[in-house]
């Protein structure tokens, strides 16, 4: 399963913080929201980022991950990039 953090229209409520970066690149102390999401889903085999088109190139350079390229035939878990995951395995708590 690939983890796919995405941005919705609610991300713009965090302007101006998200004018130059995706919502999941915001920091929560020492970690970004993306790092917190990845920690909440430790069984994910990888991460694909989905962001606003004008941020795609810089996001790809900054994170060294696929951006806005959703493969076919793969299990995907879309998670809102604004969600602040708690500590531990999110799927293990369901």
Image (cartoon, helix red, strand yellow):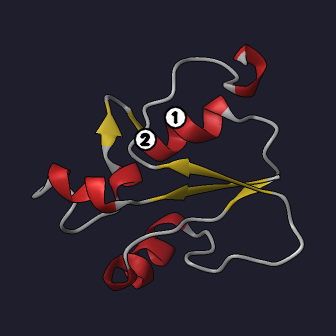
**Residue lying farthest right?**
73
34 with respect to 45 (left or right)? left
Residue placed most toward the observer, 85 or 31: 85
Q: Please tell me whether residue 47 is drawn above or below residue 65 in the rendered image.
A: above
Q: In the rendering, at what x and y percent does residue 84 appear?
A: 43, 31
Q: Please, what secondary structure does the residue beneath circle 2 have?
A: helix
16 with respect to 73 (left or right)? left
Q: Please, what secondary structure does the residue beneath circle 1 have?
A: helix
What residue sits 75% from the left and 34% below the top? 42
State the mark number for residue 74.
none
Question: Where on the picture, by quarter, is residue 53?
Answer: bottom left
Mark 1 surroundings: few (<14), some (14-19) or many (≥20) residues within 10 A = some
46 with respect to 31 (left or right)? right
Q: Are marks 1 and 2 in contact (CB under 8 Å)?
A: yes
Q: In which quadrant will I find the C terminus?
A: top right
Q: In the rendering, at what x and y percent does residue 29 appear?
A: 31, 28
* Residue hosting label 2: 33
4 with respect to 22 (left or right)? right
Q: In the rendering, at what x and y percent does residue 18 appear?
A: 22, 59
Mark 2 surroundings: few (<14), some (14-19) or many (≥20) residues within 10 A = many
Question: Where on the picture, by quarter, is residue 74?
Answer: bottom right
Q: Please tell me whether residue 30 is drawn above or below residue 27 in the rendered image.
A: above
What residue sits 56% from the left and 75% below the top? 67
Q: In the rendering, at what x and y percent does residue 47 appear?
A: 67, 58
Label 1, label 2: how far apart the Cα atoms are: 5 Å
**Residue lying farthest left?**
16
What residue sits 78% from the left and 45% below the top? 44
State the mark number for residue 36.
1
């Amino acid at each position: 399963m690939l983890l796919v953090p995405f941005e919705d229209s609610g991300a713009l409520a965090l302007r101006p913080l998200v004018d130059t970066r995706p919502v999941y690149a915001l920091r929560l102390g020492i970690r970004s929201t993306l790092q917190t999401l990845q920690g909440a889903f430790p069984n994910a085999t990888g991460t694909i980022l989905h962001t606003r088109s004008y941020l795609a190139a810089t996001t790809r350079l900054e994170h060294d991950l696929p951006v806005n390229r959703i493969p076919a035939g793969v299990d995907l878990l879309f998670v809102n990039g604004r969600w602040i995951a708690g500590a531990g395995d999110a799927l293990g708590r369901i």
